Image (cartoon, rainbow, N blue to C red):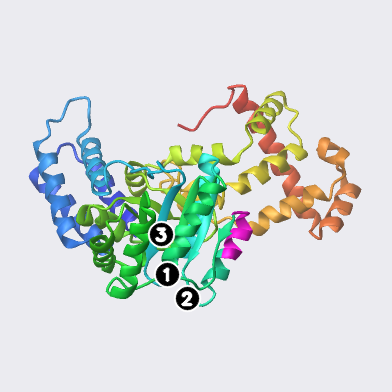
Amino acid sequence: MFESLGDRLQNAMHKIKGYGKITEDNISEMMREIRLALLEADVNYKVVKEFTNTVKEKALGEEVQKSIKPGDLFVKIVKDELTELLGGESVPLNTNGNPAILMLVGLQGSGKTTTIGKLSNFLRKKHAKKPLLVACDVYRPAAIDQLKQIGKQLGIEVYEEGKKDPVEISKNACLYAKENHFDYVLIDTAGRLHIDEELMEELQNINKEVHPQEVLLVIDSMMGQDAINVIEGFNDALQLTGVILTKLDGDTRGGVALSVRHLTHVPIKFVGVSEKLDGLDQFDPERMAGRILGMGDIISLVEKATETIDEKEAMNAAKKMQSGKFDLDDFLKQMKQIKKLGPLENLLKLLPGAKKMNLDQVKIDPKQMAHVEAIVLSMTPKERKNPEIIKASRKTRIAKGCGLSVQEVNKLLSQFDQMKKMMKQMMNGNMKLPF
């Protein structure tokens, strides 16, 4: 996400860092590059004009302290203003209900039904709460079946009454949720055009009947500036509490995310970052600004790890690394834990300076990880505990067992040995870091 915008802005930031002082001339040059980057990213032209004027004004009016390089000060101003443009602070979900009711609305084809599954999964994992999915899209063929399939995949109950009146279904679902101690009710409504008066009236009736804490518009970030009109249309009818931007992982420009809050005053609450049912992230303006400018997002990386990785197992692995007893069984366990975090190339992009180190260009073939797993699983328990006993005949047997070559077995053993030595040095503080 934001790849093309991030590249252009980072190049501009790199130039200004080389300047000895901030002047009207070099600031004007920078602002021209930033203006073009934002316009190419499909950011609304009014937003671009206001943003560049504010940055220029602040940069020229800022007193530069001797301890701060002018370039660093300019980068800070751009990051602060970018954060402000994205909304300033993250806006949490309002879950003050018993149960809390969340109604999702949107255009046809915006990915609303999949998003409601992702959101229910997020709430269950993040807050250890019990969500109920409600099928109120009674018009689209197979919409109810799609929601039931998602519910089955996640192990989350779906409330449905077939093709009945959506207002009655939502009302009955909320009663059912209260009686059965559900914490959240997530209502999947039918996709519609914001100019479709009959269907918009139906949404208004559901809203009046169940009084949801959240009315969230699901919108495809790929639709560009048309999204602003859609948000305003829905907001006029429903008083939206937030927006969920889908397919942000597939949009290299990301202009709509930079325009939404400023133009509509509706906060972005979540963004879709992959097609998987765990591919939904809370939207944090400051972190997103840092990612756009190549500063990384270590907090998100740590949060993902905290949610996914077993702390006890990680501590045991750390002790084994320090003592040099880390074996191939431990390696396999750690690899499985890392796989739960999602595609490794996406994680590398969250590291500060990922672009400078070309980590954003790294492509990791999932087949390679599968090959490693197959090689280790073809070993005996004794071999996994003591890799040093694996000689020629054992390597041949392991290669045959996993359907790979002896060279690949050799490569894995060599890499594991190097990794083990490096880990022990790092754990004991004897490793010289390259910076």
Residue topped by disc 3: 104
Q: Is residue 234 left or right of residue 29?
A: right
**Residue 190, labelled with which disc?**
1
Q: Amino acid at mark 3?
A: Leu
Label the magenta part by its dominant secondary structure.
Answer: helix
Q: Is residue 217 visible?
A: no
Cα gap from disc 3 to disc 2, whole angstroms: 15 Å
Mark 3 to mark 1 CA distance (whole Å): 9 Å
Q: Can you say which quadrant of the picture contains the C terminus?
A: top left
Is residue 159 toward the left or the right of residue 43 in the image? right
Secondary structure of the residue carrying numbered label 3: strand
Q: Quadrant of residue 239?
A: bottom left
Name the residue at the right extreme.
393
Can residue 54 be seen at all in this image of the molecule? yes
Amino acid type of the residue tagged 2 in the rendering: Arg
Magenta residues span 148-156
Q: Sequence order check: which comes first, mark 3 or mark 2? A: 3
On the image, numbered disc 2 is attached to which residue? 140
Residue at figure coordinates x 61%, y 38% from the top left: 309
Mark nearer the N terminus (1 vs 2): 2
Give the spatial CA distance, label 1 vs label 2: 7 Å
The amino acid type found where label 1 is placed reads: Ala
The location of residue 98, given as percent across then percent down, is 45, 43
Mark 1 in CB contact with mark 2 (< 8 angstroms): yes
Report the residue at 64% width, 43% height from top.
337
Which of disc 1 and disc 3 is earlier in sequence? Answer: 3
Q: Is residue 374 above or below residue 166?
A: above
Q: Residues within 10 Å of mark 3 (few under 14, many from 20)?
A: many
